[in-house]
Image (cartoon, rainbow, N blue to C red):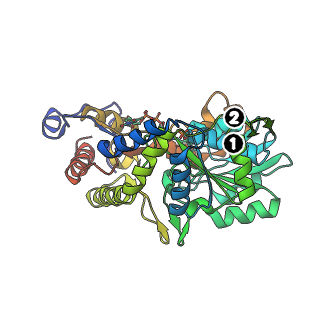
Amino acid sequence: MKARNPEAAPVPENLLAEYRFAEPIYVTSPSLVPLDEYTKLLEKIWEGRRLANNGPFHRELERRLGERLDAEHLSLFCNGTIALLVALQALRIDGGEVITTPFTFPATAHVLYWNNVRPVFCDIDPVSFNMDPDRIEELIGPETKAILPVHVYGTPCDVDRIQAIAERHGLAVVYDAAHAFGVRYRGKSLVTHGDLSVLSFHATKLFTTAEGGALIAKSGAQKQRIDFLKNFGIADEETVIGPGINGKMNELQAAYGLLQLDTVDEEIANRRKVAETYREELAELAGIQMTSDVPDVEHNYAYFPILVDADLYGRTRNELYDCLKAFNVHARKYFYPLCSSYPTYASLPSARPANLPVAGRVADQVLCLPIFGSLGTDAVRTVSAIVRELARTG
Ligand code: T4K
């Protein structure tokens, strides 16, 4: 076992001279649509003077995304967070408890809070980092209304077992599929699982409309309710049928999304090369655990998480994060800290660290390395070389 440096080891100057990037390498970088093509679509918007409220680009993007994702009943949103908020409202979940994962972005837990629902945090699986189905049933109580799992990093949850548990206990399942654009599991689009699924099209996502999202429903009637809810509850000029919110995507975003759709498969293929290169370059490195492709899954390579075992690697995750910054490589600790440790939730019984040992360890060790389609192989090799060299010199 490699002795661990108790203090943050400085980065050797010779390594900085050899490997430091002149320009920052961020954890992600949005795939930009061709500006001239986007300009043409903007000219059409200018001609039609329709900027928002279910205009032609909005309708076209809903249709084409529905085709792309095998999701007939898809509603576009201004972002993934409002789509999640509306998903719970659509199922009339506005109280009680919902079982969710602590290993996620704040939005997942916060939409529960905003719907007056108490999150119940469930520990995660050490390999998939998704909610551990073995731990769900012990958390179900009289107040439980639903399960809100996250396909974290785009890796599918154990959808069959979660569905079986939900059916046994009469619970709804809402998937936070913010990371899961285009993922297929056993030949089926991942967003068709559960009662509802939510996608994010934020600038940091592989398919983006700058800000944006979508809510995938199971039926036309459910989609209609969702469309009312995202438009103030307005049914027509003189009829407001319920307490809706403004969750609409605008025409400028929808036009951007249409052009993104033309290149999203290329983006996934390029990200796949990035992931494969990291896997080759870091394969033998002690103390660095990577994820592998899962059988029967068409991955989207949205993120590239590694776990840093400080005893074996010679540096802690935080030290590696700081060192990489010195090389102008801006990795991210997605998802540290756990949602369960935020002041809003920390006093909940399910938030006790003793109940969430795997999530706690993963959050302390995880680091997401840069991955995006335009990150060239040379850059991936350099980032990998830095990670290897830092291990040797730690
Ligand atoms: N559920 C889950 C599981 C989620 O991960 C998210 C969002 C949601 C729900 C909610 O969906 P939305 O309401 O956001 O649609 C980012 C995103 O803001 C957030 O959308 C995303 N998850 C989360 C994982 O990542 P930050 O605070 O890390 O973003 P930021 O601004 O630090 O960006 C990270 C890096 O990306 C920057 O260092 C540089 C690069 N970047 C970022 C932006 C915005 C660019 O190159 N260009 C850009 O325009 O949260």
Q: Element type at marker 2?
A: loop
Residue type, label 2: Ile
Image coordinates for residue 208, horizontal then vertical, percent = 44, 45
Label 1 belongs to which residue? 86
Q: CA distance from mark 2 to mark 1?
A: 8 Å
In-front residue for pair 350/201: 201
In-front residue for pair 288/68: 68
Q: Toward which corner of the image does residue 7 lie, by quadrant?
A: top left
- Check residue 65 in the rendering and tell me which mark sits there, or answer none: none
Residue type, label 1: Val
Mark 1 packing: few (<14 Cα in 10 Å), some, or many (20+)? many
Do tag 2 and tag 1 residues touch (Cβ < 8 Å)? yes
In-front residue for pair 166/205: 205
Left or right of 21, for residue 28? right
Q: Is residue 270 above or below residue 309?
A: below
Image coordinates for residue 354, horizontal then vertical, percent = 65, 42
Image coordinates for residue 28, horizontal then vertical, percent = 36, 43
